[in-house]
Image (tube, rainbow, N blue to C red):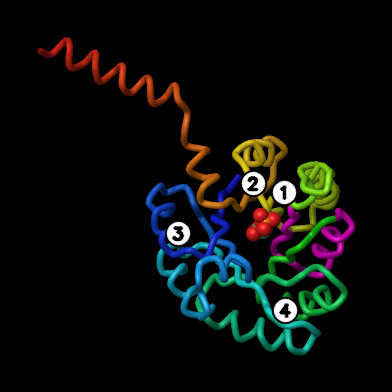
Amino acid sequence: MRIFLDTANIEEVRQASKLGVVSGVTTNPTLMARAGATDYEATIKEIASIIPGPISTEVVVEGVEPMLEQAREMAAWTPNVVIKIPVNADGLEVTSILAKENIKVNMTLCFSANQALLAALSGARYISPFVGRLDDIGQDGMQLVEDILHIYDNYPDINTEVIAASIRHPEHCLRAAVIGAHIATIPYDVLMKMIQHPMTDAGISRFLADWKNTTK
Ligand code: G3P
């Protein structure tokens, strides 16, 4: 499973990139607002200069023509940009047109396996089921990821990759990897928590103390 960073915060992208484990970045309007980023183009270009992998940016207009126009503009910002389009009727229409133009789409705000099937049929490169938001309303978000993977596995000509999104804690990431999600996009703080284990810290202290004692 690959790991993308779910943030528009440049400092977080910079810090996480040093670990050598992050191969892409996803943003959305909320993450842009949280990072204080008003210039989407400059922000995406700066992120891409740090992590060249797929960088998702989301359209912020509605309707087929406005979304198409904005998606085409965004696609020209930097190589490897991916356009986030919501998975509704207009979104499917837009995605099917962009796919024919070889513009990569990450269909977002996916809350059902049927939406994910339609996204794949429309030519989406990625589908983003929102795990945490389903958990929030008392459903099992990770079960949705599992169902989508199962459906996609049934049809080898489907090449859409599943991005487990709306990840809230390390356990989400672990479960996504166990069930075979292609990618998990995770907030910076979750990535940091994945690294930590108190026994690793205790073990390092013990080894260093023993080395000091034996080499006196
Ligand atoms: O990747 C989608 C993500 O940014 C949504 O997360 O925590 O707002 O549900 P959240």
Callout 4 crowding tier (Cα within 10 Å): few <14, some 14–19, many ≥20:
many
Look at the numbered disc 1 and say if its residue's Cβ is closer than 8 Å to ligand 1. yes
Relative horizontal placement of residue 145, taking residue 33 as reference (left or right)? right
Q: Amino acid at mark 3?
A: Val
Foreground mark, 4 or 1, reads 1
Label 1 SS: helix
Please rate how many residues cluster around mark 2, counting C-alpha atoms within 10 Å: few if below 14, some from 14 to 19, many from 20.
some
> Are circles 3 and 1 on residues that touch, CB within 8 Å?
no
- Cβ–Cβ below 8 Å for labels 1 and 2? yes
Residue holding disc 2:
168
Q: Is residue 120 magenta?
A: yes
Q: Give how far apart the Cα atoms at labels 3 and 2 are.
A: 18 Å
- Residue 27, position in %: x, y? 59, 66
Q: Nearer the viewer, residue 186 or 114?
A: 186
**Cα gap from disc 1 to disc 2, whole angstroms:** 6 Å
Residue position marked by numbered label 4 in the rendering:
98
Based on the picture, tell me whether residue 118 belongs to the magenta stretch.
yes
Asked if the beta carbon under badge 2 is closer than 8 A to the nearest atom of ligand 1, the reply is yes
* Dot 3 alpha-carbon crowd within 10 angstroms: few under 14, some 14 to 19, many 20 or more: many
For disc 3, the marked residue is: 13
**At 31% from the left edge and 16% from the top edge, which residue is drawn?**
206
Could you tell me the amino acid type at mark 1?
A: Gly
Q: Position of residue 120 (x, y in %)?
A: 80, 62
Magenta stretch, residue numbers = 112-130
Q: Which kind of residue does numbered mark 4 sit on?
A: Leu
Element under label 4?
Answer: helix
Disc 2/disc 4 C-alpha distance (Å): 31 Å
- Against 46, is 190 above or below? above
Mark before the other along the chain sequence, 1 or 2: 1
